Image: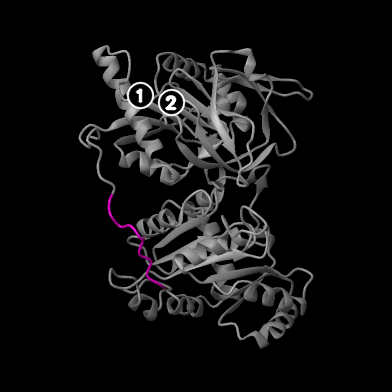
Amino acid sequence: MLKRGMDLDTLARRSTPDSPLPGILIAGTHSGCGKTTVTLAIMAALKKRGLKVAPFKVGPDFIDPGHHASVCGCPSHNLDGWILNKSSVQKLYSQYCTGADVSVIEGVMGLFDGAGGTSESGSTAEIAKWLDLPILLIVDVIGMARSVAALVKGYLGFDSGIRFAGVVLNKTGSKRHAALLKEALSPMGLSWTGTLFRNQDMDLPSRHLGLITAEEGGLEAEQADLFSIWFEKGCDLNSLLKTIRQNKKDIRPADQTETKKDPGISPSRPVRIAVAKDEAFCFYYQANLDILEKFGAEIVFFSPLRDHSLPSGVQGLYLGGGYPELHAETLSRNRDLREEILTKAQENLPIYAECGGFLYLCRGLVQKEEPRQEYPWIGLFPFMVNIQKRRYALGYREIILKKDTILGPAGTKIRGHEFHYSNLVEPISQDKSILSVYEVRNAGNSLLAPEGYAWNNTLASYIHLHFGSCPDAAKNFVAEARWHFVRNRSGFAENPNR
């Protein structure tokens, strides 16, 4: 039976193994022009038609993919041209498009913005080229009329290596305003143009690190339906779908061979790794979890906010980023879990933590301003954490391990991203047993302050690492967790692989 809202042409042209998957890349003229709102509206409209959408996000952001997932009903994946190479991006895209009818990729910042002023590395434009997908350009038209033509012409002509499916005129003020904008663009011969009117009900709530996370308030079914109605009121979705299909390309990664299974990996004996997942800890690259599973991990989620003990039989622990500072008191009150994690660390359980997870392993959160309050956390690392009003760090990072760790031997290179408003109050020199094991460089290859704090089998840092840039990091973490289990049963003191 034909699903409500799905046209026959859409149904007849659904992707098959012999028919390439159609896709669209949603780009903006700048940050704040409405990319996320429009992306969610398009996803909701496509899903309402009965289409299975494969969602993606350009760049290292965690929050937007969470909202994609709440609308599409499946995980959204990051595609970053600085953290990952071309082959890895193409392989991830191909892998996660399996079984979908259409892919929708949300861009990052402005279309051509990336890691530098003269390079396209890390930009939406770079991903559009690597995947050979057409771009739907979102233009914030507040206060504009004929000038929109100059703006759009500049974007369309800046780089001949990319293709455009059309333009969305976002935040239009009235029907008269919309008519002026379309008149201004008419000489350009755009294949598709849509108009979206200003509507405060479509605004997504935000805070210091970006939008409110999906874990705290994702789009409910009724809200997603409102987004869909808003989009279709000003945009011809059927026409856009035809434009996308006309531009579809078959993406075949350069290397389709499967990674050979390591002799030490036994699918029949998965390694049980606990992953913190709730409102306080929700920043994970889905690919990181998938890669861990590929190397033999059994991912078991738990909530540091609500669970008073770790899942039974865990052989490793992964504490991701998020907003622990917003839940400082609740985390502090959960003393049983805090003490268990500290004990496990003292017993050499392999623990990997990043950003918010790293902060949770510190002594606690202190507020320097009145009323001065302190919330004790796990206390593995000697630092107190202070949240500042201004951003403390932001940017791409490449780390080189200076010593052997649970993620690999000295010399291992892994790429990721850093973004936080907090800083550490006490310096590392206060505890000589805490080792700084990361050499850190930014996107411009400038050397930054040392990072990455190791103690026993715990490794923690502010930097969110992407295992897609170095799958061996995930492989080593799983191997360390497996060895921890073997050591506890056999009494061996050292891992022969280290």
Q: Secondary structure at mark 1?
A: loop
Image mark for residue 408? none
- Work out whether 210 lies above or below 227: above
Residue furthest left as drawn? 268
Q: Is residue 251 magenta?
A: yes
Which residue is disc 1 drawn over? 498
- Which amino acid, mark 2? Asp
Judge by depth and name the residue closer to the eye, 380 or 492.
492
- Work out whether 258 lies above or below 375: below
Residue 359 visible within the image:
yes
Start and end of the magenta stretch? Answer: 249-258
Q: CA distance from mark 2 to mark 1?
A: 7 Å
Q: Are marks 2 and 1 in contact (CB under 8 Å)?
A: yes
Residue 45 visible within the image:
no
Q: Is residue 192 left or right of residue 54?
A: right
Judge by depth and name the residue closer to the eye, 380 or 127.
127
Which residue is disc 2 drawn over? 404
User: Looking at the picture, how far across and down is residue 114, in whole percent?
Assistant: 61, 56
- Which amino acid, mark 1? Arg
Tally of numbered discs: 2
Q: Quadrant of the N terminus?
A: bottom left
User: Residue at left 45%, top 17%?
Assistant: 456
